[in-house]
Image (cartoon, grey):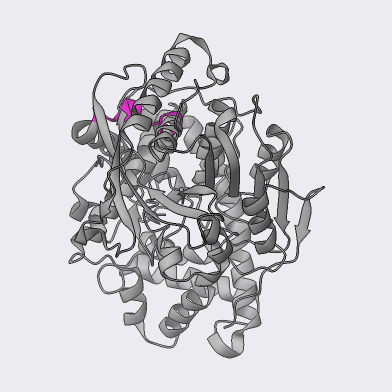
């Protein structure tokens, strides 16, 4: 399951047929050598040297900034360019790949400028290229930071405009209806296992040369090369969702290169969690947040007429699910498509009202609104290609970052047990990740995230009831990064806190980015405003 920022709604095929909203578990001049000690053995030493060579080269080359290509939909004054990085950092003079970057200059004076703020929105598989539009769209939450910083976005390796990878034909990928992710029989499980294996084989067939190098540590090295190409001695970084894990790995590999780092909605960086256990933990958290949404819908029964209790709303959901299983709505919306649409509510409060409204219309007899919201749009070939690419990168990075269980018995046992009390997301998430059990490329050992020499205080922001990145992840990173500070948004659960309006959170993020100062102790903030029906 991914975590980051969905545009409106992007349907991504869980590798084995569950539709899941793509977004999860959904951002110089002289390059000092990277800290090799975070890894282990000669491989990491060679890659650290390769990263230093690539950064030195990038610092000399800089970035040839131009107006963005028309089809990138990034209007002036945003500028675009490319940075070359080695496909394999152990071979820095070998094959190079191009990464797309964009920027908008700081809005304040020359004297106010503090350099570039580089952003990653999550995924893995999310594009950061929309980040400068926070300035052109006059986003008030980011206005103070924009005075001091150029806002810089990039597409990570394999994503979008950066040597994109693919695992399956995009139009095939979005076709609906998919099989119900919740299996009724051993035959259903067998069919899903076959789809997962075929998906992994498709990744190898279409993108095999990239797969061994699609890792978080390589993306962190890419980030350091981008830093150097920007002419920055140290990196200012904002990472959301998976972007927090990218930040954690960057901070471990390049502790002396960090100037300021804000991580928001934190992936648990423990080696024991990356990535199999992290996905199981998500299933539990999603169930909790799904219930929060149902409580809100019940409290607003006067608007939605879906029942005055959580149990009543859940009964309506189960009824809808059963109906769509028997006869997919509009011929295309079955249980898999429903999960893909409805999961945006546990992800983001901003989707609470719109999701409830579509559900309410359906119950009142308007099926079309739900079909329009949940069905794929086969005419949107660019959007479908983007969904397929996002899912391919998600799978490639999670499968390559760590060794996954290969025993189907383990997957079956863990997910069957979890599904009993957490049925909303468990099986859909399992099938999405199952290609990692038969992954055709090398799987690494995750980086041991820890504090290295020169790492400054990092600001960690987390809501207490986040579904995609459960709260324990923020606590774990806080322990590992000495001198970090944790801001907890209490009794809230929206994924991605720093872009919400919260008078307790926003000034602290600004203050840290503008002055480097952190609070003397961790801070607990009241929640942002509850959505209005």
Residue 210 lies within the magenta run: yes
In x, y percent, where is residue 453? Answer: 65, 24
Residue at 29% from the left image edge and 48% from the top image edge: 65
Which residue reaches farthest bottom?
Answer: 302
- Residue 461 shows in the view: no
Left or right: residue 353 compared with residue 209: right
Q: Quadrant of residue 331?
A: bottom left
Between 64 and 126, the one nearer to me in the picture:
64
Between 358 and 228, the one nearer to me in the picture:
228
Q: Quadrant of residue 524?
A: bottom right
Which quarter of the image is occupied by the C terminus? bottom right
Residue at 53% from the left image edge and 17% from the top image edge: 36
Using the image, determine if residue 226 lies above or below residue 459: above
In x, y percent, where is residue 148? Answer: 55, 56
Residue 83 lies within the magenta run: no
Which residue reaches farthest top?
Answer: 42
The part of the chain drawn in magenta is 208-219
In x, y percent, where is residue 185? Answer: 40, 47
Using the image, determine if residue 375 lies above or below residue 431: below
Left or right: residue 381 compared with residue 211: left
Using the image, determine if residue 84 lies above or below residue 166: above
Left or right: residue 222 compared with residue 40: left
């Amino acid at each position: 399951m991914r975590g980051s920022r969905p545009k409106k709604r992007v349907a991504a095929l869980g590798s084995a047929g569950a539709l899941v909203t793509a977004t999860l578990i959904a951002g110089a001049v002289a390059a000092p050598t990277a800290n090799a000690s975070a890894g282990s053995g000669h491989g990491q030493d060679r890659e650290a040297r390769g990263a230093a060579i690539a950064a030195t080269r990038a610092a000399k080359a800089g970035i040839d900034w131009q107006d963005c290509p028309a089809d990138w939909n990034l209007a002036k004054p945003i500028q675009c360019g490319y940075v070359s990085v080695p496909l394999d950092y152990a071979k820095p003079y070998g094959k190079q790949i191009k990464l797309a970057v964009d920027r908008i200059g700081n809005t304040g004076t020359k004297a106010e400028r503090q350099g570039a703020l580089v952003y990653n929105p999550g995924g893995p598989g999310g594009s950061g290229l929309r980040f400068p539009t926070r300035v052109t769209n006059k986003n008030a939450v980011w206005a103070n930071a924009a005075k001091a910083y150029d806002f810089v976005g990039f597409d990570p390796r394999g994503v979008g405009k950066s040597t994109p990878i693919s695992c399956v034909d995009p139009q095939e990928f979005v076709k609906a209806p998919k099989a119900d992710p919740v299996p009724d029989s051993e035959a259903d499980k067998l069919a899903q296992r076959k789809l997962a294996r075929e998906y992994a084989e498709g990744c190898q067939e279409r993108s095999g040369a990239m797969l061994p190098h699609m890792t978080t540590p390589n993306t962190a090295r890419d980030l350091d090369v981008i830093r150097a190409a920007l002419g920055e001695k140290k990196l200012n970084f904002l990472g959301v969702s998976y972007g927090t894990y990218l930040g954690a790995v960057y901070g471990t590999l390049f502790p002396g290169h960090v100037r300021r780092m804000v991580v928001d909605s934190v992936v648990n960086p423990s080696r024991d969690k990356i990535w199999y256990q992290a996905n199981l933990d998500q299933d539990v958290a999603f169930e909790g947040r799904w219930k929060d949404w149902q409580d809100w819908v019940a409290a607003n029964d006067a608007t939605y007429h879906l029942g005055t209790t959580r149990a009543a709303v859940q009964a309506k959901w189960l009824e809808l699910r059963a109906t769509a299983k028997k006869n997919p709505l509009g011929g295309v919306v079955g249980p898999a498509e429903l999960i893909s649409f409805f999961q945006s509510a546990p992800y983001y409060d901003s989707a609470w009202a719109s999701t409830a409204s579509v559900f309410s219309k359906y119950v009142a007899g308007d099926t079309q609104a739900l079909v329009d919201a949940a069905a794929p749009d086969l005419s949107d070939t660019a959007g479908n290609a983007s969904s397929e690419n996002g899912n391919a990168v998600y799978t490639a990075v999670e499968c390559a970052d760590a060794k996954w269980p290969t025993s189907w018995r383990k997957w079956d046992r863990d997910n069957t047990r979890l599904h009993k009390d957490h049925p909303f997301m468990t099986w859909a998430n399992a099938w999405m990740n199952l290609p990692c059990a038969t992954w055709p490329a090398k799987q690494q050992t995750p980086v041991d995230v820890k504090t290295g020499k020169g790492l400054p205080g990092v600001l960690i922001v987390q809501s207490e009831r986040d579904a995609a990145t459960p709260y324990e992840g923020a606590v774990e990173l806080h322990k590992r990064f000495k001198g970090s500070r944790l801001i907890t948004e209490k009794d809230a659960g929206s994924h991605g806190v720093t872009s919400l309006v919260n008078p307790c959170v926003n000034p602290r993020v600004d203050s840290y980015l503008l002055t480097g100062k952190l609070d003397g102790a961790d801070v607990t903030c009241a929640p942002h405003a509850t959505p209005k029906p």
